[in-house]
Amino acid sequence: MRARDLQGGGGRGSYRAGFGPMIENERAELADSLWSATATAGPPCPPLEGELEAEVAIVGGGYTGLSAALHLAERGIATVLLEAREPGWGASGRNGGQVIPGLKEDPDEVERILGPSFGRRAVRLSAEAADLVFDLVARHGIDCAAVRAGWIQPAPDEAGVRLQRARVEQWQRRGAPVEWLDRGAVSAALGTGLYRGGLLDRRGGSLQPLAYARGLASAAIRAGARICGRSPALRLERVGAGWRVRSRRGAVRARTVLVCTNGYSDGLLPGLARALVPVVSVQVASAPLSDNVRRSILPGGEAASDTRRLLVYFRLDREGRLVIGGRGAFGARGIRAAQARLRRLALRMFPQLPDDLAWERAWGGLVALTENHLPLLVEPEPGLVAAAGYNGRGVAMATAMGRVLADKAAGVPDAELDFPLARLLPIPLHGLRRPAIALAVAFKAVQDRLRL
């Protein structure tokens, strides 16, 4: 007898929420995270008490803020980071843990949008972003199950095949270790016959995302940064040539403030939230697979995310669990339904999985999108800088943009940064984003089913 899916609409396998550590202060449908249950403990980050002075204050304890804090502290620049909860609480501790080189747009398009000088620098920054992540993991001894076995981007249809062939050519022209996999090769690499081809980027890999965030926090503290958890930034005030960041029980005065709140941005920096579109991404994780099934799925240890309009990403973790994710919804019912669809999709993709496969975890969080699919780097006022909007490439790109922010705060001229400053402009009709996203998701799901 096939077990009933306990969360959202039937199908093979079973899932029962609510055992073991979950994400604190989060809705139940988003909180049952594999990463919270398996991450190494983070460092003590006591709340801010009283008034501190620093050269740089950072708001947000995700990859961007933690990378900036680490790179600033290593330069001997006094840095205080304020995090509303704990380092890695947001998307940095919930994502799929895929370390993907490059930006959402292809290199030629990035250079067209940003121009030849900044375009080449941005492409190089994104190309080397995975190197930066794995270097930080090795240099600081971060225990985060890091595996650099490559990243596969498979295509389910001929449109995706054409896109991928062009992408491979562009990266090969720039000397990157990217290669084309035909249908037979991609099927063997993934363990499923649903895809018609794809690219293999040997620069990529995977890690335990929350453990990586906590490892960055530990490294930043050892380097001299101060990280204050449970210390939300409530207000920014101009004080002379610098800034004052108020929290509940204290404040930080600094010459420069870096806002690194990404998909969880609020009204602290006016206009930032309206320049981003936060969307829900959800994931589910199976129980550890048997050895013979484990060897048949991604046997080379790569991570994968496909070219569907509503992309699906998947990999195995260190214990052999299948972790698969994709686009979610805003309401609890829609989120649970999306998680149930992922469980059903996994069983269609990999018929070698047992009918009674147990699903251990289901969770999610916010991904920040931008209108042009490129990260956003802005300085709306002197000494007030923000970076956000990684469009699903946040593990590598947020780490790299944190270093760019550190360069900016350390006095590197704007013309010499590895990514250009942009104007902070609201996305048109931003207030209608939720119904528009829901309609777009439904339309793209139909297109994916019909392979249009």
Image (tube, rainbow, N blue to C red):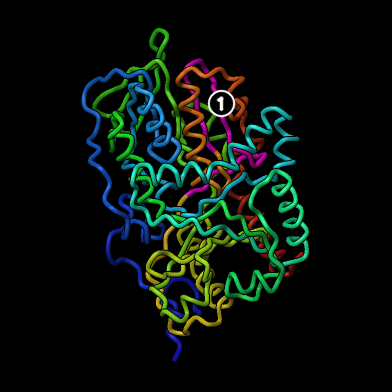
The picture places residue 328, in percent across and down from the top left corner, at 53, 58
Which one is in front, 357 or 148?
148
- Taking the image as shown, residue 128 lies to the left or right of residue 73, namely right
Please tell me whether mark 1 sits on a helix, a strand or a loop.
strand
Instruction: Answer whether residue 142 is magenta in the image.
Output: no
Task: Point out the residue furthest to the top here.
Answer: 240
Callout 1 crowding tier (Cα within 10 Å): few <14, some 14–19, many ≥20:
some
The residue lying at 36 percent from left, 21 percent from top is 77
- Image coordinates of residue 407 in percent, x first then y, are 49, 24
**Residue 373 covered by magenta stretch:** yes
Q: Position of residue 213 (x, y in %)?
A: 37, 45
User: x%, y% of residue 385?
Assistant: 49, 24
For the stretch drawn in magenta, the main secondary structure is: strand
Q: Which residue is mark 1?
A: 378
* Residue range of the region highlighted in magenta in the rendering: 366-388
Given the image, on which type of amino acid does mark 1 rest? Val
Q: Can you tell which quarter of the image residue 105 is in?
A: top right
Asked whether 79 or 243 is in front, the reply is 79
